[in-house]
Image (tube, rainbow, N blue to C red):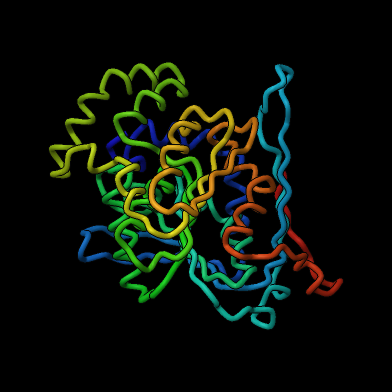
Amino acid sequence: MVRAPNKSLIGYELSRQFSPYNSGHDGLLSIDGVKQKSIHLPSRGIDVSFIEIEPNNYGFDYLTKPVIHESGKIWRIATHWKWLEAPCNNSSQKLPPQKTLVLLHGWGRNKNSLLNYGLALSQHGYRVIIPDLRGHGNSTGNWVSFGAEEGQDVSALMDLLKIETFDILGFSLGASVGLHIASVDDRVNHLVVIAPMHSLEQTIPKFAKQSPKWISDLVLHYQYKALKLVNNISGYTYEVTSDAVSPAQLITKPVLFIYGGIDNMSNYELNYLLFKQGSTQNKLKKFEGLRHTHLLLHQSAIMPTINQWLGLTDSNRSNLFNNDCIYKSFNY
């Protein structure tokens, strides 16, 4: 849980849970206007890999539906994406950039996992930046802090890209990172926090309970050594490094908190605690029947709430294209 997921066996094994979506993400990466970049952050001592999506009418559309198991619970989220081939999404359809949005992924995931959100939001005029957090994807870094260090990394990235103001949408680990950024970086305007982590101390046992037995046994055996390791290599105590409540207290702007009704990693008690910090205009939104991973995968369910919070209106941008345009698609 502390070692960089892109260098650990556990990180690799967990990433395989989402392998059915990899081909879909690979298709989205091929879209003209989706650029993969890398930059060195001298002040942080790491290289950060990120995706930049320019504002454009990509014809990207999505539909997600829960598939119900015979037990009556959601088994998985069925996904349908479609997008336009070039030249239908070329420069003639480009939109003037109006705002910058930073998307932050969860533990063990990478920047590709948020491409579907990035494309949807870029069609509203956002310049979208999706970084691999330290120790994830193609970014360097030997350990993760569950919030504080990653937040400083993202702020340093915004400095180098000369971005004056930006919005943030973060999921799980990325949600906690977003809280840390917004607590110290005045450039953040809107913040959407989806299923945040509380602290490393509380996350480790929760993570273990929801993992395969061999991972669970390994994590629980080493959890206290992991916490001690954080102290040794970061110079922080783990409470300071990964606590989500402390930064939430410092945020003066309203925050949207989203959580799943049966999410044991980020439950009602945690989200309500965070919701009560900071601004009295914070909003707390619950989605019934959704577990931790299903929450983000069910884009059709949560996107209207996100759009409303960001001041966006839904529109069918497919009508902007002529009948000669060819769509690609992904179904799972």
Q: Residue at x 36, y 31 (%)?
A: 203
* Apparent side of residue 325 relative to residue 60 in the rendered image (left or right): right
Residue 112, position as x, y percentages in the image: 51, 53
Residue 125, position as x, y percentages in the image: 60, 73
Residue in the foreground of this view, choosing between 281 and 50: 281
Asked if 78 appears above or below 251 in the picture, the reply is above
> Which residue is the extreme one toward the front?
280
State the count of labels.
0
* Apparent side of residue 114 relative to residue 177 in the rendered image (left or right): right
Q: Residue at x 63, y 69 (%)?
A: 124
Camera sees residue 108: no
* Apparent side of residue 206 relative to residue 292 in the rendered image (left or right): left
Residue 109, position as x, y percentages in the image: 45, 44
On the rendered image, what quadrant is the N terminus found in?
Answer: top left
Residue 138, position as x, y percentages in the image: 38, 53
On the rendered image, what quadrant is the C terminus found in?
Answer: top right
Asked if 161 appears above or below 304 in the picture, the reply is below
Quarter of the image for residue 186 reads bottom left
Q: Residue at x 55, y 36 (%)?
A: 293
> Which residue is the extreme one toward the right?
323
Camera sees residue 211: yes
Q: Residue at x 35, y 16 (%)?
A: 217
Asked if 20 appears above or below 149 in the picture, the reply is above
Asked if 192 appears above or below 42 in the picture, the reply is above
Residue in the foreground of this view, choosing between 303 and 63: 303
Residue in the foreground of this view, choosing between 329 and 159: 159
Quarter of the image for residue 285 reads top right
